[in-house]
Amino acid sequence: MTAFPPPLEDPEDDEHSPAERAAAAARSTWVSVGVNVVLASAQIIIGIFSKSQGLIADGIHSSSDLIADFIVLLANRHGQKAADADHPYGHYRYETAASLALGVLLLAVGGGMLWSAVTKLEQPDAIPQVHLVALWVACGALVIKEALFRYMLAVAKRVKSSMLVANAWHARSDAASSLVVGLGIIGNLLGYPILDPIAAAIVGFMVAR
């Protein structure tokens, strides 16, 4: 007679109940949603008017974070459901699926950024001069994204959620991309216009990686 293993508890965290982990995930993710709405709007709008492709790319990256945040919220909602006839061990694998979806999303966004930047680099004489305001927006975004990353990672570690860790590192990749964009804008302002689309290409590579 075959002995089947008993239903598993949450494999990630024995100290917090599913409800506590779900509440922490929802709270931190909604904070991320609010931050990314403001950042993406500011980066894309200012990027268009300041003629900075790098800043626009960074804004698109921030927009991808919104999609990632809603994937996390969806997985968080379903992952806390109790075991049933179709899922005798619970719904915790929603977190694993969400982590995979985040990775696929980043790959697609990064590929699109690379394609756009390479297209611009094929016509270097047509690259415009960037306005100084783009640099201030990039620097502000860097500070905000790094702070968001530290906050989200702290919550993820507290409740031991791989899904939240993945989303936190998504925010960290945004902080790194803002740094690269800032350097590209500085180069453009110093008389090397090609550095702005190069920064956009680097951001695309970083996101895809």
Image (spheres, grey):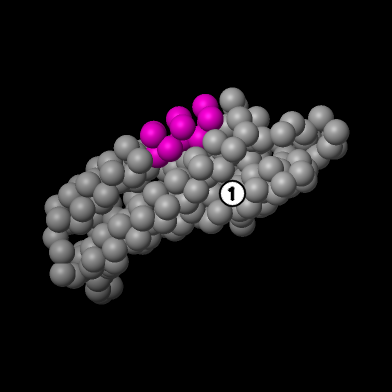
**Residue at x-position 43% and y-position 37%:** 39
Please tell me which residue is depicted at 34% across the width and 44% down the height of the picture.
32
Give the side of residue 7 with respect to residue 64, left or right.
Answer: left
Q: How many marks?
A: 1
Residue 22 vs residue 28, the one in the foreground: 28
Q: Position of residue 109 (x, y in %)?
A: 59, 41
Residue 142 visible in the shown view: yes
Q: Which residues are magenta?
A: 36-46
The residue that disc 1 covers is 182
Residue 54 placement, left or right of 96: right
Is 39 magenta? The answer is yes
Q: Is residue 65 above or below residue 148?
A: above
Expressed as whole percent of the image width and height from the top left, the position of residue 90 reads 24, 55
The image shows residue 9, relative to residue 170, as above or below, that is below
Q: Main secondary structure of the magenta part?
A: helix
Assess whether residue 130 is covered by the magenta stretch. Answer: no
Residue at 26% over, 60% down: 155
Of residues 108 and 98, the one drawn nearer to the viewer in this rendering: 108
Residue 1 position within the rendered picture, expressed as x and y whole percent measured from the top left: 25, 74
Assess disc 1: are there few (<14), some (14-19) or many (≥20) residues with their C-alpha within 10 Å of its C-alpha: many
Q: Name which residue type carries label 1.
A: Gly
On screen, residue 69 above or below 16? above
Question: Which residue occupies the foreground of this view, 93 or 162?
Answer: 162
Q: On the picture, is 66 further left or further right than 14? A: right
Q: Residue at x 23, y 63 (%)?
A: 159
Q: Quadrant of residue 68?
A: top left
Is 85 on the left-hand or right-hand side of 185? left
For mark 1, give the secondary structure.
Answer: helix
Inspect this view and state whether residue 170 appears. no
Q: Quadrant of residue 114?
A: top right
Q: x, y percentage for residue 75?
A: 32, 45
